[in-house]
Image (cartoon, rainbow, N blue to C red):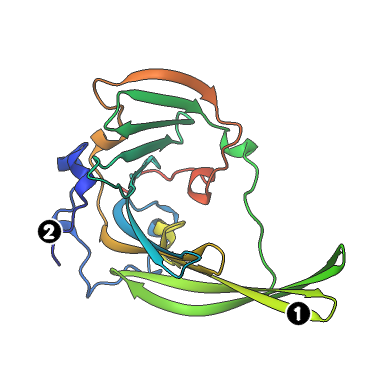
Amino acid sequence: MGVRISVFLICFAAAALTFPASSQVSRNRVVSAQMGDAAHNARLPYMAEFKTTQVRTLFDGTAMTSETTEVDAIDSQGRRMTATTAPTQGGQTPETRFTVFDPMTHTRISWASPGKEVTVSAVPIPAAAQPCGASWASFTVISRRTGKSVESVKTKVEDLGTETIEGVEARGQRTTTTTTRKIKRHKESQVNTFELWKAVAPGLRGLQVRIASDNPQQGKMRKELVNFTQAEPDSSIFQLPPGYEIVNRKVAMDWCPSSDEVEPAAAPPQ
């Protein structure tokens, strides 16, 4: 499998963020849930590269497509680095935004490249963190009356089974939300779909390998794992970049931790 490195990796720590071909997960090897007890409780370090494609249709029927590249790295201590590069226009230099979360110090640092400023934020301790989001029932129907219209929302959740994506076994779930509005004798419906595929291996808990959504108002979005390395990342990518100035320290009260960040990191396997 060829080495695929995003252009933004040149901006910062290019050597540290590359995917060595010798350590890549073979397409013939599946990272699955079939592990021993020790592996069940351990966090597997990895580096993962994602590609996000978004398509929006304008009022005149023109389709606009944009692509974003993201690299995620997690080490056995639970530290997480995310680097995201958004598309640019007019020959501008691509900007990459970095975020590093450290569960041991309860801090999050963020910066952009090119740039010279770093923001360091204190984050809530795991015990004080509030849960994010809500779980859906298999079928949910909500009706409400707004003015002269009646709106009905029906939600359906489907299990899509398992699939191997870049050597990682994942289970998928599709949520379909149908919103029907009735104004007098006129009725119109809007259908939104959302797919989420998560790794099933205990050591890769929280790894989302595919996300796809279709919304008539916002367009179509697909984020998918395109490269995966199961190995300890270089520790330098979790450090503050040289030559940057810390300009702000604040408590991230509006920050909502993910399941990876709420759960305590396991000790490195011996």
* CB-based contact (under 8 Å), mark 2 and mark 1: no
* Amino acid under disc 1: Lys
> From the viewer's perspective, is 56 left or right of 252?
left
Q: Position of residue 68 (x, y in %)?
A: 34, 54
- Judge by depth and name the residue closer to the eye, 115 or 3: 115
Dot 2: within a 10 Å radius of its alpha carbon, few (fewer than 14), some, or many (20 or more) residues? few
Task: Give the quadrant of residue 139.
Answer: bottom right
Q: Residue at x 29, y 21 (%)?
A: 244
- Residue 243, compared with residue 124, is above or below; it is above
Would residue 257 be found to the left or right of residue 113 on screen? Answer: right
Q: Which residue is mark 2?
A: 22
Q: Is residue 218 left or right of residue 133?
A: left
- How many residues crowd around disc 1 within 10 Å: few (fewer than 14), some, or many (20 or more)? few
Q: Residue at x 35, y 23 (%)?
A: 117
Separation of disc 2 and disc 1 at Cα? 58 Å
User: Residue 123's x, y, as percent?
Assistant: 53, 31
x 30%, y 40%: residue: 95
As rendered, which of 188 and 167 lies closer to the eye? 188
**Disc with the residue nearer the chain's start (2 vs 1):** 2
Amino acid type at mark 2: Ser
Within the image, what quadrant is residue 15 found in?
Answer: top left
Is residue 165 depicted above or below 269 in this figure? below
Residue indicated by mark 1:
187
Q: Position of residue 36 (x, y in %)?
A: 38, 64
Q: Secondary structure at mark 1?
A: strand
Q: Residue furthest front?
A: 60
Quarter in which the N terminus is drawn: bottom left
Q: Is residue 30 left or right of residue 128?
A: left
Q: Nearer the viewer, residue 243 or 261?
A: 243
Question: Quick one: SS at disc 2?
Answer: helix
Where is 143 relative to 11, above or below?
A: below
Residue 46's spot in the image, x, y percent? 30, 52
